[in-house]
């Protein structure tokens, strides 16, 4: 006798997701699960934007795989029937686990909020199909966790940056200077092509970034180029005069390459490896200093120089950095702003003293 749908477990309701290697037959696999198919297509139709359907499905798969594997006492979420899921399960097990089990140990509030929203939609759909009386996720307390104080970012001196520059191999010197002078993320800089450089306006158009995985013609490819991480990451950044001159020289030296050729690519016009710059940089740093220096620290150096000149215009600095929220700029570099304010106040007081 066929089991009534309200007696199915969450895992049974969601069925077996196709793996990414079998994305071409995802529709065949969906065909065997009316519940999931109805839920999935309803949510897809409600989407704003145009993600391909298989990409959208992969996103749901990853989120549900994570949530269904969470232990809630003596079983997992997937082994529960929807009606047996409680507010306590959500507050004491699911949400804390989502916050603390990311690839790097912790997930951001934004990521967990998105995962919660996805599961919440599924539970609401379960309610509409009489699989549970009340959605417990709606009643579960959800708030930003208390985050431990992050160590303050050390401000790098111009002398130190110049000292490292003088010892760098020719192969990465311009890339190093470009990073210091524009503050681009490493992935954004690696993905730059010559049509992103505006020599007349002395600026770079940041619109793409290197990605570990990209979808090309419905196929997943490793180490490709995709869109930047957020809408605000898509930005125009001025290029300092000296660096622009060196870029022009490189452009001529390379024989005026095509617009789609990588600015900092290999001699075969492939994108530079994600670890190459860092490895070369750290070899030099170890020889000339006892400090540690990551490639991302060059972005922090750029931020420090911008704050020195635009400290009273934090909005401009945030836009140049491509931050999604001005609060990010304030949280990361707030201590530098305070130091600058104290320094300016001290200088003003000393200027009034009659020595």
Image: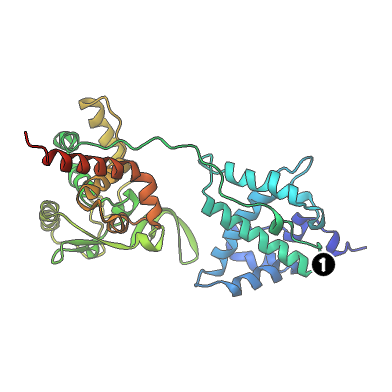
Packing grade of label 1 (10 A; few <14, some 14-19, many >=20) is: some
**Residue 62 relative to residue 174: left or right:** right
Q: Residue at x 23, y 26 (%)?
A: 289
Above or below — where is 78 with respect to 162?
Answer: below
Q: Is residue 312 above or below residue 53?
A: above
Q: Residue furthest front?
A: 354
Horizontal side, residue 195 vs residue 86: left or right:
left
Which corner quadrant holds the N terminus?
Answer: bottom right
Residue at the right extreme of this rendering: 1
Residue 28 sits in quarter: bottom right
Tell me if residue 144 can be seen.
yes
Task: Find numbered disc 1 in the image and state the secondary structure of the residue it sits on.
Answer: loop
Residue 39 location, quadrant: bottom right
Q: How is the image coloured?
A: rainbow
Q: In the image, residue 286 lies at what x, y percent?
A: 26, 27
Residue 220 position within the rendered picture, expressed as x and y whole percent measured from the top left: 48, 58
- Residue 5 location in percent, x, y? 83, 64
Q: Which residue is mark 1?
A: 130
Q: In percent of the image, x 77 and y 40: which residue is there?
A: 73
Q: Quadrant of the C terminus?
A: top left
Q: Say which of 305 and 224 sits in front.
A: 305
Q: Residue at x 69, y 44 (%)?
A: 93
User: Is residue 254 shown left or right of residue 65?
Assistant: left
Q: Nearer the viewer, residue 226 or 86?
A: 86
Any part of residue 101 in sight = no
């Amino acid at each position: 006798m066929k089991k009534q749908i309200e007696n199915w477990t969450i895992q049974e309701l969601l069925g077996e997701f196709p793996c990414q290697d079998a994305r071409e037959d995802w529709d065949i696999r969906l065909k065997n699960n009316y519940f999931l198919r109805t839920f999935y297509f309803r949510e897809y139709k409600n989407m704003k934007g145009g993600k391909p359907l298989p990409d959208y499905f992969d996103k749901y798969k990853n989120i549900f795989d994570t949530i269904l594997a969470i232990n809630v006492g003596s079983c997992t979420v997937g082994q529960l029937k929807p009606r047996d899921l409680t507010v306590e399960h959500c507050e004491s097990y699911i949400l804390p686990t989502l916050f603390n089990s990311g690839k790097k140990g912790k997930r951001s509030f934004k990521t967990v909020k998105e995962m919660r929203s996805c599961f919440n939609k599924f539970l609401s759909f379960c309610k509409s199909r009489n699989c549970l009386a009340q959605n417990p996720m709606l009643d579960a307390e959800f708030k930003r966790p208390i985050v431990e104080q992050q160590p303050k970012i050390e401000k790098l001196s111009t002398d130190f940056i110049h000292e490292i520059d003088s010892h760098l191999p020719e192969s990465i010197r311009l890339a190093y200077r470009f990073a210091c002078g524009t503050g681009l993320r490493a992935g954004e800089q690696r993905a730059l092509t010559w049509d992103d450089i505006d020599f007349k306006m002395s600026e770079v158009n940041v619109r793409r970034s290197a990605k570990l995985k990209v979808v090309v013609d419905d196929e997943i490819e490793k180490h490709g180029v995709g869109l930047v991480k957020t809408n605000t990451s898509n930005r125009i950044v001025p290029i300092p005069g000296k660096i622009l001159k060196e870029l022009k020289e490189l452009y001529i030296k390379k024989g005026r390459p095509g617009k789609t050729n990588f600015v900092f690519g290999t001699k075969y016009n492939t994108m530079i490896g994600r670890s190459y710059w860092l490895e070369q940089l750290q070899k030099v740093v170890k020889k000339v200093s006892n400090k540690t220096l990551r490639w991302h620290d060059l972005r922090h150096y750029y931020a420090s120089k911008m704050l020195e000149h635009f400290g009273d215009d934090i909005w401009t600095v945030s836009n140049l950095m491509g931050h999604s929220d001005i609060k990010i700029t304030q949280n990361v570099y707030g201590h530098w702003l305070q130091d600058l304010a104290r320094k300016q106040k001290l200088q003003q007081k000393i200027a009034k003293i009659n020595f």
